[in-house]
Image (cartoon, rainbow, N blue to C red):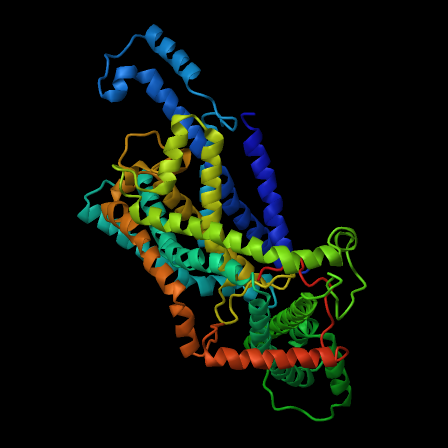
């Protein structure tokens, strides 16, 4: 069993990352390099989360061997014996092996350091070098590979230059103020410290939001009326975005039509125009083809290749945005219809969810397992209790995380709850409990952070959309965020359980993951200051999220969020209800339903 757990985790995590990429990306249409870079970045970050608990249990076992082989029973109380001879040392090591229980998931010495080194440095290469370049490459409107590469290099020159300047400033600080001899190992440590500091800064902001919003969302989702009102709100907002996307696409298509008519088939730039036309929707292609045949006058447009490159970028963006809004609109219609059907069927004597619209493509699960009767019991009886119990459990986990973030620097007494659980289990060699505590805790923190990454939206530049509608730029941006957030998150968790001696200042064997990070004591302002006190900010962020201060600020700026006691929310809910009523009354002219109201890839 020594390598079975590691091998199984590696395989399972790969398919998990592939499944998520299938849900959000288009495996058939998007560029292979984009898909490969995103898959690799997600895969490496998920690997860290799944393998770190095995590293913790292996380290605890090695710590037990070390104590029992180099100390007599009295040495645990501070009395050390003289150095034993080789025979006695061998006898003590054998005795230690008999005392210490070997974990079922034990990983042999030398495997994890190499594994972590490959995973960490590959993820850092992706997030700081390759993915930013591929983002610019995928978004570029150039018509050749060389042109795309040139555009990507120019756009990333400032990006790379900024981080290089920050790294140089850290080197000057370390060399002058700390008077360090900058060896290659110390340069690596400074680089790791800089990356982890940037990641921890963003991590705490996202974590503070997720620790409150995830339990609250499950508690509120126990109410069908709340879910229905929120869907109405989303429908009203999306209707505006959908209309804006259609209008923007029409404006861009007008520009394409002008260039299509002005650049004839014998023009040197005609190939560029033909490339742009292939990215346009079929309806517009046919319309522009007829206009060219009927056109008899010359346009005043003075086409240039740089102008066509910009137009190409605009076409790709407009078509992608229109497609996203159409899919989201269909999904919201399905969800609204489903919630309305549940609301109407709650008092049904037949105890069956009566569908207002039938689907011809029901899967075998809905036909034989999740039948209308089972669906009624779940939606009308059990879901409310389940969601509230889950919300209470997640709230307790959130409180434990916040308390531990504010107290993990205290080693005597131990105040961090996660450190207490791990140390109690360590005394009884309960490695399965240790791994479960580590895995559940890291997974919960990752869900809080990653779900926030999946929900946030920077205007229309970054937006993860399910059902294969996420563009290449957003996929790679999410990969960059994951690679920058996961290492400091795991390092922070090791501090919570007092497995990072740089923070707890305990004489313990380091985990293999911590060993590749180097000694952060090289930069005391970071190891003894920022890493310890900045995570306490999560308490203030949680309080701000409880009172929805961020959502209220966004409302003031015109980015409306769902807040129950807000007049704008009430107006948008009423508007969304009316739009759904119209969609029901005119199903033929509306968007076609996608069938199952709760598709497996949908992340709300």
The spot of residue 544 in percent (x, y) is 36, 64
Q: Residue furthest top?
A: 87
Q: Is residue 55 above or below residue 460?
A: above
- Left/right placement of residue 318 relative to residue 503 reads right
Q: Is residue 40 above or below residue 423?
A: below
- Left/right placement of residue 474 relative to residue 260 reads left
The quadrant of the image that shows the C terminus is: bottom right
Task: Residue at 41%, 33% (x, y): give it.
Answer: 512
The spot of residue 82 in percent (x, y) is 23, 12
Towards the viewer: 113 or 510: 510
Task: Residue at 45%, 34% (x, y): give it.
Answer: 434
Towards the viewer: 420 or 238: 420
Task: Residue at 40%, 29% (x, y): give it.
Answer: 426
Quadrant of res 221: bottom right
The spot of residue 103 in percent (x, y) is 48, 26
Q: Is residue 436 above or below residue 405?
A: above
Task: Residue at 37%, 10% (x, y): give it.
Answer: 90
- Left/right placement of residue 198 relative to residue 7 reads left
Quadrant of res 9: top right
Q: Residue furthest right?
A: 360
């Amino acid at each position: 069993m020594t390598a079975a757990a590691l091998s199984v985790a590696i395989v399972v995590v790969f398919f998990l990352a592939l499944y998520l990429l299938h849900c959000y990306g288009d495996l058939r249409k998007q560029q292979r390099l984009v898909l490969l870079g995103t898959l690799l970045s997600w895969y490496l970050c998920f690997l860290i989360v799944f393998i770190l608990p095995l590293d913790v249990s292996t380290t605890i076992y090695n710590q037990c061997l070390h104590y029992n082989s180099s100390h007599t029973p009295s040495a645990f109380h501070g009395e050390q014996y003289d150095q034993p001879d080789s025979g006695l040392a061998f006898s003590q090591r054998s005795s230690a092996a008999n005392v210490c229980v070997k974990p079922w998931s034990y990983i042999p010495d030398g495997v994890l350091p190499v594994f972590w080194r490959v995973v960490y440095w590959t993820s850092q290469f992706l997030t700081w070098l390759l993915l930013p370049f591929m983002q610019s490459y995928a978004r570029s409107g150039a018509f050749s590979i060389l042109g795309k590469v040139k555009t990507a290099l120019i756009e990333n020159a400032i990006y790379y230059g900024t981080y290089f300047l920050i790294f140089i400033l850290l080197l000057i600080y370390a060399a002058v103020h700390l008077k360090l001899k900058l060896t290659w190992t110390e340069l690596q440590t400074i680089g790791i410290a800089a990356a982890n500091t940037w990641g921890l800064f963003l991590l705490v902001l996202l974590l503070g939001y997720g620790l409150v919003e995830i339990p609250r969302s499950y508690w509120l989702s126990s109410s069908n009326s709340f879910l229905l009102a929120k869907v109405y709100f989303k429908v009203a907002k999306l209707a505006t975005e959908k209309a804006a996307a259609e209008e923007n696409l029409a404006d861009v298509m007008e520009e394409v039509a002008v260039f299509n008519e002005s650049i004839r088939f014998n023009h040197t730039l005609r190939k560029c125009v033909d490339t742009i036309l292939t990215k346009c929707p079929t309806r517009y292609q046919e319309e522009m083809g007829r206009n060219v045949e009927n056109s008899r006058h010359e346009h005043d447009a003075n086409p240039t290749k740089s102008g066509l490159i910009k137009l190409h970028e605009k076409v790709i963006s407009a078509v992608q945005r229109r497609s996203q809004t159409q899919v989201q609109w269909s999904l919201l219609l399905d969800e609204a219809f489903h919630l309305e059907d549940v609301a109407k069927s709650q008092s049904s004597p037949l105890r069956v969810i009566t569908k207002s619209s039938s689907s011809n493509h029901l899967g075998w699960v809905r036909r034989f397992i999740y039948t209308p009767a089972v669906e009624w019991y779940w939606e009308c009886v059990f879901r409310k209790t389940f969601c509230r119990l889950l919300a209470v459990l997640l709230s307790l986990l959130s409180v434990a995380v916040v308390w531990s973030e504010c107290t993990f620097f205290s080693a005597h007494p131990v105040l961090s709850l996660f450190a207490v659980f791990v140390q109690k289990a360590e005394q009884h060699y309960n490695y399965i409990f240790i791994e479960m505590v580590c895995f559940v805790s890291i997974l919960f923190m990752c869900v809080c952070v990653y779900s926030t990454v999946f929900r946030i939206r920077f205007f229309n530049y970054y937006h993860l959309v399910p059902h294969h509608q996420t563009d290449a730029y957003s996929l790679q941006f999410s990969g960059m965020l994951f690679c920058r957030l996961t290492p400091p998150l795991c390092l922070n968790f090791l501090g919570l359980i007092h497995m990072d001696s740089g923070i707890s200042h305990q004489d313990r064997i380091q985990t293999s993951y911590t060993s590749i990070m180097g000694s952060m004591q090289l930069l005391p302002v970071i190891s003894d200051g920022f890493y310890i006190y900045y995570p306490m900010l999560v308490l203030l962020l949680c309080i701000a999220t409880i009172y929805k201060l961020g959502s209220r600020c966004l409302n003031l700026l015109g980015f409306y969020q769902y807040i129950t006691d807000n007049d704008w929310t009430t107006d948008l809910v009423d508007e969304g209800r009316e739009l759904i009523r119209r969609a029901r009354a005119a199903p033929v002219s509306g968007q076609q339903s996608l069938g199952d109201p709760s598709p497996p890839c949908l992340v709300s």
